[in-house]
Image (cartoon, grey):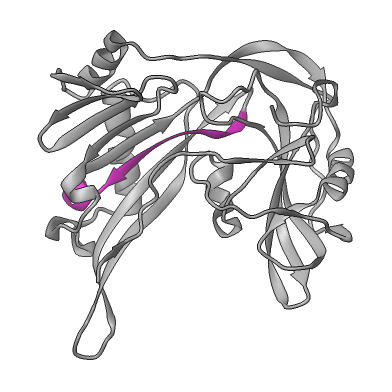
């Protein structure tokens, strides 16, 4: 049986913990993708941690950082047609309660009315298995990066502030009936770009391009919360954020975690999906590391809002 392992969106899910802190929920095994602003899934809950230690030196950040005010971006029919035109698509325009859709074989363009979440997809190849997308037909990761960047720039689709953040791979296998071994018969390369504000990454803002065999574009997806500068606020130091982390707890699959060791601390912004009521993008500390429990070790992550004057939630 064929299984295609491709992420389907740029969705950030939030879990309200204790009525005070809003926390992302995801598979911790892939939390680096979330930090780049791409995939989130789950859910896994927040767990208390008796001990937190550091495996790195504390980074140094300014005492103040800019807070951004979010800007709603509802999409009209005219907006949808303008965006579709960038892909060489002109209609007819279909409409339902949520989306505008244009189909022009082999691609389908969709954009959500409320959130502006946009996809451009070669459905038969992205959602199935095509011989053109066997592993030997793929470009290298670096070639795919250039193909994706060139496509976005040449089609006026690269958002302001977007930076390259890495690649992931979708893969498909079938079971050899003779010896029941798995044989790979599908692969693609997803090139990820993340948003930045004030030279800090924006977890939750992202655009990706899926590149298939012969460098063909199989999918483009964009989820991006627009924002404008509001004003600077004093922020927590990394050491103060660690103390907040001890109070908040960590997100992990580990049962009964006993000790967390931080191996990464980054100051970033956290953007929930457009359409959510998030008035501000606040500077937020991202923590990642390893965790020890009764039955082994695992990984954890957490986001700790850094502007206490605006409250403890990432909203």
The answer to whether residue 216 is seen in the rendering is: no
The residue that appears at 23% across and 43% down in the rendered structure is 218
Picture residue at 19% right of the left edge, 53% below the top: 213
Residue closer to the observer: 192 or 251: 251
| Quarter where residue 97 is shown | top left
Which residue is found at the position 40% from the left and 50% from the top? 7
**Direction from residue 123 to residue 159 in the image, left or right:** right
Residue 35 relative to residue 111: left or right: right
Residue 164 visible to the viewer: yes
How many numbered marks are there? 0
Report the magenta stretch's main SS: strand
Classify the position of the N terminus by image quarter. Answer: bottom left
Quarter of the figure with the C terminus: top right
Q: Residue 290's image quarter? A: bottom right
Q: Which residues are magenta?
A: 200-215
Q: Position of residue 49 (x, y in %)?
A: 84, 59
Would you say residue 201 sits in the magenta stretch?
A: yes
Residue 94 position (above or below residue 248): above
Residue drawn at point x = 61 percent, y = 47 percent = 25
């Amino acid at each position: 049986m064929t299984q295609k392992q491709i992420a389907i969106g740029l969705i950030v899910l939030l879990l309200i913990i204790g009525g005070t802190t809003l926390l992302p929920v995801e598979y911790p095994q892939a939390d680096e993708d979330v930090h780049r602003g791409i995939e989130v899934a789950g859910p896994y809950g927040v767990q208390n941690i008796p001990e937190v230690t550091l495996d790195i030196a504390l980074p140094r950040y300014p005492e103040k950082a800019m807070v951004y005010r979010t800007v709603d971006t509802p999409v009209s029919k005219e907006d949808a047609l303008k965006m579709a035109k960038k892909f060489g698509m002109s209609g007819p325009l279909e409409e339902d309660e949520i989306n505008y859709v244009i189909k022009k074989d082999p691609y389908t363009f969709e954009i959500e009315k409320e959130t502006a979440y946009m996809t451009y997809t070669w459905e038969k190849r992205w959602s199935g298995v095509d011989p053109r997308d066997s592993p030997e037909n793929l470009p290298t990761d670096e070639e795919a990066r250039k193909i994706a960047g060139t496509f976005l720039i040449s089609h006026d689709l690269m958002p302001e502030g977007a930076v390259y953040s890495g690649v992931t791979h979708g893969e498909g296998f079938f079971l050899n009936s003779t010896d029941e071994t798995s044989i790979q018969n599908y692969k693609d390369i997803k090139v990820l770009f993340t948003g930045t504000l004030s030279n800090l990454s924006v977890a939750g803002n992202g655009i990706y391009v899926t590149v298939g065999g012969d460098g063909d574009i199989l999918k483009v997806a964009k989820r991006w919360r627009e924002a404008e500068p509001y004003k600077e606020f004093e922020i927590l130091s990394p050491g103060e954020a660690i103390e907040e982390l001890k109070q908040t707890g960590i997100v992990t699959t580990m049962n009964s975690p006993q000790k967390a060791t931080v191996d990464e601390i980054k100051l970033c912004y956290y953007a929930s999906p457009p359409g959510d009521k998030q008035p501000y993008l606040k500077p937020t500390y991202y923590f990642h590391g390893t965790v020890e429990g009764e039955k082994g070790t695992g990984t954890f992550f957490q986001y700790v809002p850094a502007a206490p004057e605006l409250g403890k939630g990432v909203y």
